[in-house]
Image: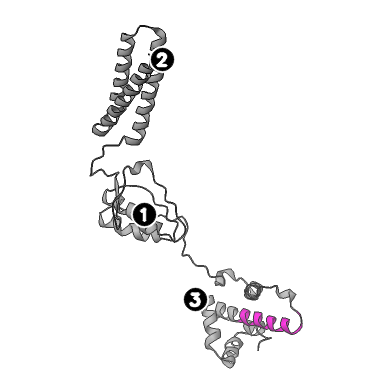
Amino acid sequence: METHGLFFTIVLISGLALTFWGTFKITRFAFPINLAITSGCLGILFVLDSNFLSRAGAGLYIGCPLLLLNVVLYVFLQKETLNKDNKYQVHFKVKRGNFIIENIKRGASIIGSAGSGKTESVVLNFLTHFSEHSFCGIIHDYKNFEITEMAYPLFEANGIDFKIISFDEIYDRVNPIAPQYLQNEESVNEVARVLMENLLEQKGSGSFGASKFFIDAAEGLIGGMIWKLRTSYSKYCTLPHLIAIYQFLDTDSLIAFLSSNTTAKAMADAFI
């Protein structure tokens, strides 16, 4: 008798398993339909057998496996019915086959080593899709305008307003020897000393003997040139002009240039 009961249970579960699988293939409402089928089968078994223990056994040995099976099939077989033109379905351009993200609203994570092509192969496809379907959002460009250069023409071609926001002026330049920073001779000498220490990567005070003389001469030369530019050519008092003058003039011309200003000549006295 127990053998017949076990055989009946196996056959019933197997048959309903095939039924469940079939409903998941033909309709997206398979999960509630299968729940209704399970409830109906258990109801029939309860009506046919009034014994409480038999009912409990039917619920345990038939109901639980069917519920578990329905959940498993739902997880692995249930698919969203998406329109082919759905704007949240992203189609990627690939060399072979198809690669589709069914619902971009769920989010996407791109993981790869540096230089593996994440931007060109994945981000570009996302940007193309977003621009074609008029998505709005914020792009955090961490690649020094590389992503911006990709995104701007895509959105511009589709007539979408594209604004670039930068909280830091990345290309701002500073002139450390601008006349407004140099109030007197002492400030000029300080700037010249700092420039030399940074060029030599050492403190000037750590030099002795002949090396200190040449360092002092270089500091004096730089200070004298800065003072001459500050007082006579304030418009050109910049490091590029300072370097250009030093490279362009020969020794005699450089001495004459410095000697035309008393203070500049005094600063560069060791060089002259």
Q: Earlier in the sequence, mark 2 or mark 1?
A: 2
Q: Is residue 237 left or right of residue 268?
A: left
Q: Which residue is mark 1?
A: 122
Calculate the distance from the C-alpha at mark 3 to the C-alpha at mark 1: 50 Å
> How far from the left and from the top, in percent, is residue 205?
74, 74
- Looking at the image, the residue that sits furthest to the right is 209
**Front: mark 3 or 2:** 2
Q: Which residue is mark 3?
A: 235
Q: Residue at x 54, y 76 (%)?
A: 239
Foreground residue among 219 and 92: 92
Residue 35 lies in what quarter of the image? top left
Foreground residue among 180 and 85: 85
Residue 15 vertical position relative to residue 164 in the rendered view, above or below: above
Q: Which residue is mark 2?
A: 57
Residue 254 vertical position relative to residue 53 in the rendered view, above or below: below
- Looking at the image, the residue that sits furthest to the top is 50
Calculate the distance from the C-alpha at mark 3 to the C-alpha at mark 2: 98 Å
Foreground residue among 101 and 207: 101
Q: Amino acid at mark 1?
A: Val
Q: Amino acid at mark 3?
A: Lys
Check disc 3 and report its element: helix, strand or loop: helix
Q: Earlier in the sequence, mark 3 or mark 1?
A: 1
Tell me the magenta residue range.
208-224
Is disc 3 surrounded by few (<14), some (14 to 19) or many (20+) residues within 10 Å?
Answer: few
Foreground residue among 35 and 236: 35
Check disc 2 and report its element: helix, strand or loop: helix
Residue 8: tell me if it is visible: yes
